[in-house]
Image: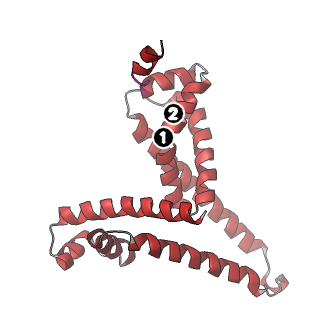
Amino acid sequence: MLASAASQPPETTEQLIEGCLKGDQHAWDLIVTRYWRKVFNVAYKFVGRHDMAEDLTQEIFLKIFKALGTFDRRANFQTWLISVSRNLCIDHYRSVRKEREMVDRTVDAADVSPVSAEPDALVTLERGDRRAMLHRALAQLPDTLRAAVLLRDIQELSYQEIADRLALPEGTVKSRINRGRKELARQIRRVMSDEE
């Protein structure tokens, strides 16, 4: 009995969506488990903080659940999911920016008393921690990947400029940047888990 259950192929995304639309909570849990990391990565790129990315990911999945009935079954679900996630992240960014602008407009500079150095110190410390974590993660990358990522993401050179500087074909440069970013993300997660 167990052997036959174990040998069954995993449910397709189409089957899981069908189950969700019929109210099957287990099917929804499987979709969330299957796609959590992809949605989290999109959210993290927008907010840059683990805790905020987790909150945003939960909001995104809630909205995706509500919008699941609008998904066109002829389309690729993962592509749709990432597209919806990006759009919701952009909406989130705009709403946060709008809130900040409203606060900025409603606060009169004459009414604001000087802020103590403590919050600034905390912000500086947090930034320093993030920089230190990034440096530790970068140090773990092979030289070839680290150079490609630094030239693209820190120095903001074009692919062609990097190819010229490293004397490599542009395709190789793109490949190294892609592999370097993935490895950097993996190393950052490792550094974060070591610190926790």
x 62%, y 45%: residue: 58
Left or right: 166 in relation to 43: left
* Residue 115 image offset from top left, x and y in percent: 78, 84
Provide the residue designation for mark 2: 31
On whether residue 10 falls in the magenta region, the answer is yes
Where 13 falls versus 1 (above or below)?
A: below
Check the image and name the residue furthest to the top: 1
Where 92 falls versus 20 (above or below)?
A: below
x 19%, y 63%: residue: 172
Q: Is residue 90 visible?
A: yes
State the predominant SS element of the stretch in magenta: loop
Position of the C terminus, as image quadrant, is bottom right
**Within 10 angstroms of label 2, few (less than 14), some, or many (20 or more) residues?**
some
Provide the residue designation for mark 1: 35
Which residues lie in the magenta part?
8-12
Label 2: element kind: helix
* Residue 62 image offset from top left, x and y in percent: 62, 39
Relative depth, front residue between 15 and 186? 186
Residue type for callout 2: Ile
Residue type for callout 1: Tyr
